[in-house]
Amino acid sequence: MKEDNPDVCILLPTLNEEATIAQLVRDFRSEGFDDILVIDGNSTDRTREFAISEGASVVLQEGKGKGQALQQAFDLLENDYIIMADGDGTYLASDVHSLLDPLLEDRADHVIGNRFANYEKGAFTRLNRTGNYLINRLFGFAYGEWLNDILSGYRGFTREAIKSFELNKTGFEIESEITIESVKKDMRIAEVPITYLARSEAAATKLNPLRDGFKIGATIYQLAKVHNPMFYFGIIGTILLIFGILTGAFVVSEWLKGVTRELMTILTAILILSGFQVLIFGFMSDLIVSLHRDTIRTIRRIEKNKK
């Protein structure tokens, strides 16, 4: 059923999507959404022309990368609700209502479309599925929020949510950074099942699974430093301790043979002491972050009660 949604903007970041963008804009319009913003990363094909011909507004991206495009768009948008989708035709416009409902019903500030709930054969390679699984598990361990698809490109937000994001990543790490920001700011996150289609042969992927997967994993780990310091410093401390124990075992085995390894002994002591110090630092940092988080929640609760 078509609906008129004047406070909803459909945001479509694009780069050379002439094979799919026109149909995608038509599909969203057929669902009752006329406010469609295409932010284009300087496509060299007819993406912008096709989008405009179907009634979408087009903004030329000032920089490079999907992350930069979304940051620019978030600064521009003032709609009450924003639905973000990739322009490559892998998402169904008809799923937009599933993402929008939790926002309209005030059950969520950020809604993620779970691609793994229903995906077409060929939509994921085995490497993609494995990489997504590992990244989602890493995210869960680091942030305590066990989600199924933190890399989904089909999402919904309230205006307050996008205006509160402090984003820095310019590439494909942006989805993970947005999810991390939502967790850090205690937003209500909901996941809804969506359909994920196989990519059209005419719409080549811009994602390099290994390179971009490593960047995404590194982003999740790096940003955990200020949200879950025990996770961040715990890994470093544990690695130092393991190497210290290994070198220590070697020193002891050599000593039993009558061979003294002074330098290795010093290295062992440094590694083990450094490992313990890093773990203690992580524990203290985690305590400080927890106290800070509780203080912020109390302040927000007081401000909400005043309203």
Image (tube, rainbow, N blue to C red):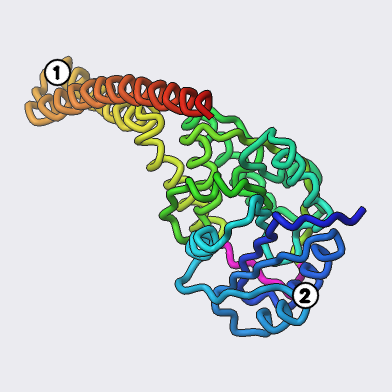
Please state the extent of the stretch shown in magenta in the rendering.
200-207
The 10 Å Cα crowd at callout 1, few under 14, some 14 to 19, many 20 or more, is: few
**Can see residue 178?**
yes
- Residue under the image location 14 percent in, 23 percent down: 269
Tag 1, which secondary structure? helix
- Which of the 4 quarters of the picture holds residue 91? bottom right
Three-letter amino acid code at the position of disc 1:
Trp
In the displayed structure, does residue 71 sit left or right of residue 199? Answer: left
- Find residue 241 and report its horizontal and vertical position in percent: 28, 24
Tag 2, which secondary structure? helix
Q: Earlier in the sequence, mark 1 or mark 2?
A: 2
In the drawing, what numbered circle is on residue 22?
Answer: 2
- Which of the 4 quarters of the picture holds residue 51? bottom right
Q: Main secondary structure of the magenta part?
A: loop
- Residue under the image location 29 percent in, 27 percent down: 237
Q: Residue furthest front?
A: 306
Q: Residue furthest right?
A: 1
- Find residue 197 and report its horizontal and vertical position in percent: 79, 57
Q: Report the residue marked by disc 1.
A: 255
Q: Residue furthest top?
A: 256
In the drawing, what numbered circle is on residue 176?
Answer: none
